[in-house]
Image (cartoon, helix red, strand yellow):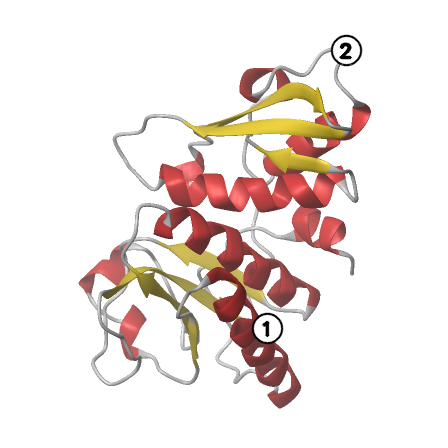
């Protein structure tokens, strides 16, 4: 499965089979987490065979079942932490999909279980990602049009539209899709793209933007562009 195929196949899943993760899957996830932690200056941690985080009152509200494995999404407090959490966390979500797993970004409906994770000085937990073998593959949701979230037109490159289409398949908090992309133009033979978060009473728009930006990069493929 390619990353583009993973984008198209992946949906949020809250109910999992009571089945431990395969050893090779755990190894692949931990190796990638180590790489992305260095690249993104984060402290993401895979927790396996731990059922308590999704057994509390909030978890019941979130309708989780057999969510015994999850990724603690943490890093040093900073203005761009949430966006980096979204961007690099989605790397793990799509990798998990290619490995036959299912996932769900979890902003509130989990409990922090002491002793299951480590936090350094000035670090905080931004969210969790539930991970495992889903009872189903999830369901798709209604999404916005490319015109609603971008300045796509007959004058913008075809790859820009493909990037937007991939971004629209990105998971966002309660499917709010409060982001937008603008094709700015070309400077020094490099295309310039501006991505913005919108306003939401729910929050999580910075994290959503990071997730959407990674999807955009996959959809746009190997095009020479920079974020501005």
150 relative to 109 in the view: left or right: right
Judge the density around disc 1: few (<14), some (14-19), many (≥20) Cα neighbours within 10 Å: some
Q: Name the quarter where the C terminus is drawn.
A: top right
Residue at the spot 50% in from the left edge and 70% down from the top edge = 38
Helix, strand or loop at label 1? It is: helix
Q: How many marks?
A: 2
159, 190: nearer the viewer: 190
Residue 214 is situated, as x and y percent measured from the top left of the image, at: 59, 46
Residue at the spot 53% in from the left edge and 82% down from the top edge = 19
Q: Quadrant of residue 137?
A: bottom right
Q: With respect to residue 78, does 56 lie above or below? A: below
Residue 81 is situated, as x and y percent measured from the top left of the image, at: 36, 52
Residue at the disc numbered 1: 32
On the question of residue 170 being in view, the answer is: no
On the question of residue 47 being in view, the answer is: yes
Label placed on residue 197: none
Q: Quadrant of residue 55?
A: bottom left
Residue 131 is situated, as x and y percent measured from the top left of the image, at: 49, 68
203 relative to 209 in the view: left or right: left
CA–CA distance between discs 1 and 2? 38 Å
Helix, strand or loop at label 2? It is: loop
Q: With respect to residue 137, does 70 lie above or below? A: below
Label placed on residue 155: 2
Residue at the spot 59% in from the left edge and 73% down from the top edge = 32
Residue 158 is situated, as x and y percent measured from the top left of the image, at: 80, 24
Q: Name the quarter where the N terminus is drawn.
A: bottom right
Q: With respect to residue 176, does 118 lie above or below? A: below
């Amino acid at each position: 499965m390619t990353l583009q195929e993973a984008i198209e196949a992946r949906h949020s899943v809250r109910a999992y089979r009571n089945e431990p993760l395969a050893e090779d899957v755990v190894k692949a996830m931990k190796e990638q987490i180590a790489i992305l932690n260095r690249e993104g200056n984060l402290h993401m941690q895979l927790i396996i065979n731990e059922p308590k985080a999704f057994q509390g009152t909030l978890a019941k509200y979130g309708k989780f079942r057999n969510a015994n494995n999850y990724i603690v999404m943490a890093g040093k407090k900073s203005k761009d932490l949430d966006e980096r959490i979204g961007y690099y966390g989605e790397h793990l979500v799509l990798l998990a999909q290619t490995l036959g797993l299912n996932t769900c970004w979890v902003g509130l409906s989990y409990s922090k279980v002491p002793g299951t994770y480590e936090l350094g000085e000035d670090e905080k937990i931004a969210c969790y990602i539930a991970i495992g073998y889903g009872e189903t593959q999830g369901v798709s949701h209604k999404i916005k049009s490319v015109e609603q979230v971008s300045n796509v037109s007959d004058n913008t490159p075809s790859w820009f539209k493909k990037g937007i289409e991939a971004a629209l398949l990105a998971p966002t908090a309660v499917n709010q899709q409060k982001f937008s992309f603008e094709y700015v133009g070309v400077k020094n033979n490099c295309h310039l793209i501006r991505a913005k978060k919108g306003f939401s009473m729910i929050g999580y728009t910075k994290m959503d933007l990071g997730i959407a930006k990674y999807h955009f990069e996959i959809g746009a493929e190997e095009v020479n562009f920079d974020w501005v």
